[in-house]
Image (cartoon, rainbow, N blue to C red):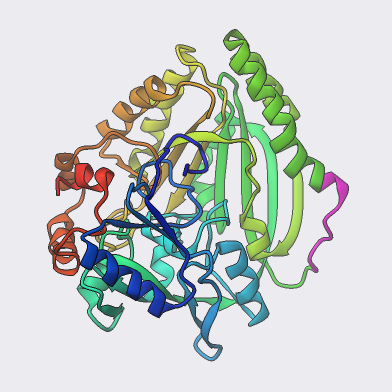
Amino acid sequence: MKNWAENVLWTPSKIATPSTEEEIQQLVLKAINDQKKIRVIGSGHSFTALCSTNEVLVSLDNYQGKIHIDKEKNIATVKAGTKLSLLGELLFEEGLAMENLGDINVQSIAGAISTGTHGTGVQLKSISNQVIGLKFINGKGEIITCSATQNTELYKAAQVSLGCLGIITEVTLQCVPTYKLKLQNKKENLDDVLATLDERNSQNRNFEFYWIPYTNTAWTKTSNIVEDSEPDKVNFFNYWTEFVLENYVFKVFCEYARLFPSQNKTVANITAASITNVKKVYHSHKVYATQRLVKFHEMEYNIPAEAYKDVFKDVKKIVNSRKFNIHFPIENRWVKGDDVFMSPAYGRDSAYIACHVYNKKECVSYFKALEEVFRAYDGRPHWGKMNTISPQDVQTMYPKFDAFLKLRKEHDPENIFVNTYLKTLFDL
């Protein structure tokens, strides 16, 4: 087995693909009886070894779909293995939508919330905050439910759990009525973007930008709700710019920069020059997601929003030093703070900076240099992205970590959901 980025490899002794909650429960009970470890894999989009195990690996790909829809309250309960792409379509059929999403939709809903996955928007929280109820099978084989009104402390721990409490089977989401977004992608001057960040974030529902290394070019992405506009039809221009250029053409340049490291700046300049302005109106679940065919390794850190400009200045200095064999754009997003125990945005409005390296290149030295910057500003890593934090670091970063560990031990006393990575990360 390997994850999407192909940087984590493992060989499970068994792969199970249950299709009912009862089958999931039986798998857990058998693992307990056999004293086997068990981990769940969604789509393998974590860059860390969260899913790896040499014992029992569970895939919920056969456990997808709607369970219950309450249109009056805009609430949807779905099976935990449901991929975000399918979820968007299922909700749309019911006149519902997610309030916000990230820029990839291949993950399962359980995997997305369990790692703290997020979108962008200073008034919008991460995806786990759209969850108002959860059901999971714990390490004793029990079916546990928790929500915003029932077992509330456990609910706050389970919203971002890294799969430590058990196997999530049902996710209840507070949705909103369907809406359309007008997306505007623009090539802009980086200095202009940085000088107007506060206005861009406050005046737009969703704003983010990519900085092209070694250049003064930013690729901005802004979206806002529109009421009257009809959805655009997908045309050749959109297909060319959003799929061909960003995937197949970019892949060629990645290979070129890998073979000729001295050409990283040239590739970055070509990338900047090839950016085209795009406008489109479409249903929300079709706007957030972009297709990523070029594989990469990624480090993403959450930092306090007020520290963003200083952090970005330091990141820019490191990148422009040209000491590292990189050319990938650097992504910048914002989220509203929350009260979820293990959410990187716990207790603070936040910015996220994501740095990527083509997966056929060495990334350790580059990420190490960046991580030093992020950590200097009280950074917390995205749980699904590469990092080198220690148990002591986690203790310092998360005020509710002890409460989380207590609940984890209560629901998984035999550590059947603890793999080598989690044992090291949490010192279990």
Q: Residue 96 location, x and y as percent?
A: 60, 78
- Magenta stretch, main secondary structure, is loop
Q: Residue at x 15, y 58 (%)?
A: 405
Q: Is residue 242 above or below residue 168?
A: above
Q: Is residue 298 above or below residue 31?
A: above
- Please say whether residue 125 is visible from this viewpoint: no
- Considering depth in this image, is 376 or 255 the residue closer to the camera? 255
Q: Which residues are magenta?
A: 230-238
Q: Residue 301 location, x and y as percent?
A: 37, 40
Q: Residue at x 47, y 65 (%)?
A: 17
State the image quarter where residue 427 is shown. Answer: top left
Taking 293 as reference, is 419 left or right? left
Q: Residue 382 location, x and y as percent?
A: 37, 46
Q: Is residue 338 above or below residue 216?
A: below
- Considering depth in this image, is 384 or 201 the residue closer to the camera? 384
Q: Residue at x 74, y 43 (%)?
A: 243
